[in-house]
Amino acid sequence: MQKMKETIDASESKVAKPFLRWAGGKSWLIKYLDNIKKSNYNNYHEAFLGGGSTFFYLNPKNHSFLSDLNSDLIETYQAIKDDVNAIIKKLKSFNNTEEDYYKIRNMNFESIHDRAAQFIYLNQTSYNGIYRVNLKGVYNVPYGFRTKEFLDENVLIKASRSLQDTTLFKGDFYDILENVNTGDLVFLDPPYTVSHNDNGFIKYNEKIFSLEDQIRLSAMIDEIREKDAFYILTNAAHTTIEEIFEKGDRKIRLERASLIGGMNAERGQTNEFVFTNTNL
């Protein structure tokens, strides 16, 4: 495996931040990625894009391929990339009240930029920023009574700049492999099939990302390694996960605060694995 070369950092003032709240996001991880940020890899790839914390922090210098199974999410990123001003203009017409929230939630917009504005607005003003749809595919998260401003023009504009040299697509995580070449970096943050700290399986998540999906992901990593490319995988610290992804590469166990849950949810420390063949 070739080594990553270090290069000079881009100006931090130009680095974008996530414009969405996202359950399971990796904002806690970025402080561990300084070596990666300073490294010289070729193209960047990220499946399971979500809030994009890692992508925005790394601010890849070359082309990026970003994907997710959530079509509404990918459409929103594409709209931000194409015409952020149209989205900002639409967001300025929205108000953060309970009455307006349910009115906007029930609207069906024809324009991709109006739909993106709706997606961002609901994400920022809903309960816990959860993305949830019913059996008919209709977003049904209740109002969150959040007082923080839902529109930060500067964040959206910087995000749009960062997305200019990207290819965005909806698809299975395995689809991203088609574009991976020697010296590329692949970041993978799948939905967790098992709970942390050896507490067993999360049954509700089996429909989102099954144990079989974890095994497929392991096979995909084998192909990434065969291409002489780099990967970073985050996953639950669980013996089953440890067995599935054991490849003789680096395995790092990190502890973080558990943040997922409602207002009365128990907070505690959570352990997560990072598997990688980089110099993280």
Image (cartoon, rainbow, N blue to C red):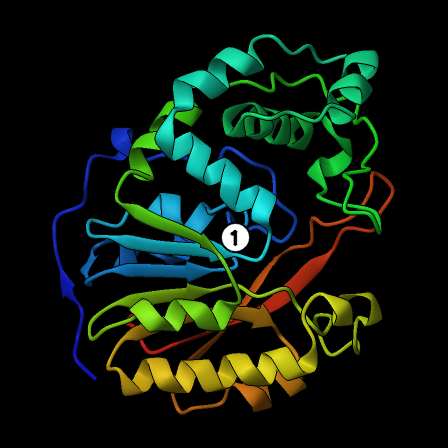
Q: Is residue 21 visible?
A: yes
Q: Classify 243 as above or below 150.
A: below
Q: Classify 89 as above or below 257.
A: above
Question: Where's the N terminus, which quadrant?
Answer: bottom left
Residue appearing at x 54%, y 49% in the figure: 50
Image quadrant where residue 162 sits: top left
Q: Classify 32 as above or below 250.
A: above
Q: Classify 209 as above or below 124.
A: below
Q: Position of residue 212 (x, y in %)?
A: 65, 83
Q: Is residue 280 visible?
A: no
The local crowd at label 1, few if under 14, some if 14 to 19, many if 20 or more residues have their Cα within 10 Å, is some
Residue appearing at x 37%, y 73% in the figure: 177
Q: Nearer the viewer, residue 233 or 90?
A: 90
Q: Nearer the viewer, residue 117 or 187?
A: 117
Say whether residue 113 is left or right of residue 125. Answer: left
Say whether residue 263 is left or right of residue 218. Answer: right
Q: Position of residue 171 (x, y in %)?
A: 51, 61
Residue appearing at x 24%, y 52% in the figure: 63
Residue appearing at x 60%, y 20% in the figure: 150
Element class at badge 1: loop
Q: Can you name the residue that lies furthest to the front here?
A: 110
Q: Position of residue 271 (x, y in %)?
A: 62, 67
Q: Amino acid at mark 1?
A: Lys
Total label count? 1
Image quadrant where residue 273 sits: bottom right
> Where is mark 1, residue-wise?
26
Q: Position of residue 152 (x, y in %)?
A: 49, 19
Say whether residue 270 is left or right of residue 102. Answer: left
Question: Where's the C terminus, which quadrant?
Answer: bottom left
Q: Nearer the viewer, residue 148 or 225?
A: 225
